[in-house]
Amino acid sequence: MNKEAIVNIHTEDPFMKVAIEEAFDGISQGHGGPFGAVVVRDGKILGKGHNRVLVDHDPTCHGEVSAIRNACKNEGNHDLSGSVIYTTGEPCPMCLFACIWANIEKIYYGCTIEDNALIGFRDEEMSTMILSRDQIKDFEECVDRDACLKLFDVYLAIEHQTY
């Protein structure tokens, strides 16, 4: 797989660039979907991760959960107060609530729930089952969508397992 395709993706935010690179690392190894995330506090990356559903045989190991686990391990603490998370796709309900449980203060996501559905993920279906995104509009913010859509294009162009 051509890493040059990812290196040349322009992002507005350097932390989203890291999330995109993390997602690329995961999809290039067949670990799961194109979802990477980084947890940041005071301009410093505390942890990062990507979707590992397929490689770990774990339906809960989404990019955000992987990054939260990594940040907590690195910090030696289960409380990520004062941090934010950058993620290539708008979090599913499980990941959204994992961010809340970890005391993450803000979510910056690239592709929307609707974009996730276009590449075969059912986040939208699950989101509508339990909440209205309007209730959390100040907690989430879409950034660098075009860059993350390019990542999704790379994902669609490679051989991958849909789950």
Image (cartoon, rainbow, N blue to C red):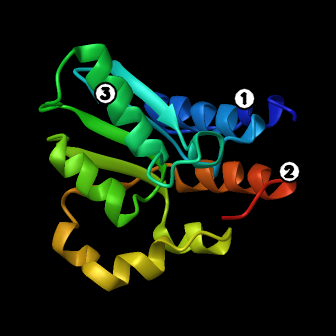
Q: Earlier in the sequence, mark 3 or mark 2?
A: 3
Distance from Cα at disc 1 to Cα at disc 2: 17 Å
Amino acid at dot 2: Ile
Task: Give the number of the mark in front: 1 or 2.
Answer: 2
> Mark 3: which secondary structure?
strand
**What residue lies at 33% left-to-right and 35% top-to-bottom?**
68
> Mark 1: which secondary structure?
helix
Q: Position of residue 96 (x, y in %)?
A: 29, 57
Disc 1 to disc 2: CB gap under 8 Å: no
Residue named by callout 3 = 40
**What residue lies at 35% left-to-right and 83% top-to-bottom?**
128
Task: Give the number of the mark in front: 1 or 3.
Answer: 3
The numbered disc on residue 115 is none
Q: Earlier in the sequence, mark 1 or mark 3?
A: 1
Q: Earlier in the sequence, mark 1 or mark 2?
A: 1
Amino acid at dot 1: Val
Residue named by callout 1 = 7
Q: Which one is nearer the viewer's eye here, 8 or 122?
A: 122
Residue named by callout 2 = 158
Q: Tell me: 6 left or right of 54.
A: right
Mark 2 neighbour class, 10 Å CA radius: few under 14, some 14 to 19, many 20 or more: few
**What residue lies at 59% left-to-right and 69% top-to-bottom?**
121
Distance from Cα at disc 3 to Cα at disc 2: 30 Å
Q: Which one is nearer the viewer's eye here, 14 or 81?
A: 81
Amino acid at dot 3: Val
Where is 102 relative to 21, above or below?
below
